[in-house]
Amino acid sequence: MTIFVISILIGCLSVMTVQGRRGKWPPGMPVTRPRLVAVGGTYEGSQARQSDGYVIQERLIATADGTAGQATGRGTGGGAGSGAGGGIGGGAGSELGHVAAALALAAVVAARPQHGGTREQDLDECAQAAHRAVRNAALRDPATPGLSSTLDLIVLDPGESPRLRFAHVGGGGIWHCPRGGRPVPLTTSHCFDDGPPLRALGRATALNPEIGSVAVGPGDRVVVVTDGVLRALGAQRLTELLAEGVSPAACLDRLYDELAAVEPKEDATVVIADFVTV
């Protein structure tokens, strides 16, 4: 009896067609699904202090580089003090940079911006949610007064005219690589020389993220990096590497080879994504 039922089910499946919004879909034909096909990784810095994190979803990519100030306490001379919120200080707080990055990314995932509105302003609101998450954590725990994080976020809006919306805070960067064209930076660094970022999530000051959007077509590529990559390779060398036109995986391997040659002190994260429609 069981074999008979299974035979009937197999027979039914063999003649089924996919019913789409525009009618029946021919059997065996792939369904169009615009999405980002991505690879990513974090090259761990020689300081062995984890600070970076990233998230890859079908239509969302986000990276964050967290920092933590030194916990307030009594020094050898008997005075009290705390590390700056914009950089990694000594003591226990210096080991908590990854906490700030995780808080920022968790807030982004919880906001689900790829399923909400399609305005650029909607990503500003998402960045503000991440800002509050990091700031509130720092206020709740006196041991980590200097929690802060960068954030680079992109969302794919497929539609009839696909585009990428982005939000940027800190020293990382987002590059758009049109198919057959030169890589173009979509953001500007919020760092001055090698100093801490002038804008960051979790600071007491109001957050003013850089937001925007760009049209994309099949085969276009977007690359998101944290400031560890830019400090190690420089924007010009990174642009040259992104222009080589290899696959995302090969591009990531090439970047890792370059990072290994310079041995960056801090974490360096790269996410490379191609826009595909099948």
Image (cartoon, rainbow, N blue to C red):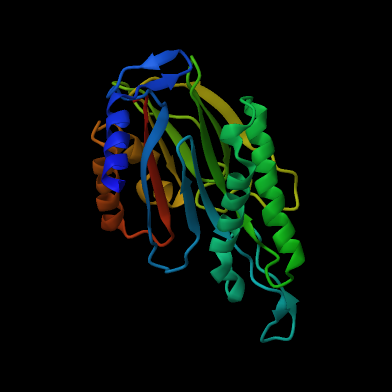
Residue 123: give x, y in percent of width and height: 63, 34
Q: Is residue 201 left or right of residue 94?
A: right
- For the point 23% across and 42% down, the residue is 250
Q: Residue at x 29, y 51 (%)?
A: 256
Count the marks: how many?
Answer: 0
**In the picture, which quadrant includes the C terminus?**
top left
Residue 240 seen by the camera: no
Percent x, y of residue 165: 54, 29
- Residue 109 left/right relative to 35: right
Quick one: which residue is furthest to the front in this view?
1
Which residue is found at the position 28% from the left and 57% from the top? 260
- Horizontal side of 186 relative to 220 (left or right) equals right
Name above or below for residue 261 compared with residue 145: above
Q: Is residue 12 visible?
A: yes
Viewer-nearest residue: 38 or 243:
38
Q: Which quadrant of the view contains residue 218?
A: top left
Please identify the quarter of the rendering in which residue 138 is found.
bottom right
* Quadrant position of residue 11: top left
- 10 up-or-down from 56: above or below: above
Vertical placement of residue 65 versus 250, above or below: below
Residue under the point 40% across and 43% down? 271
Q: Position of residue 169 (x, y in %)?
A: 59, 42
**Residue 210, image x and y in percent?**
61, 34
Front residue of 131 and 59: 59
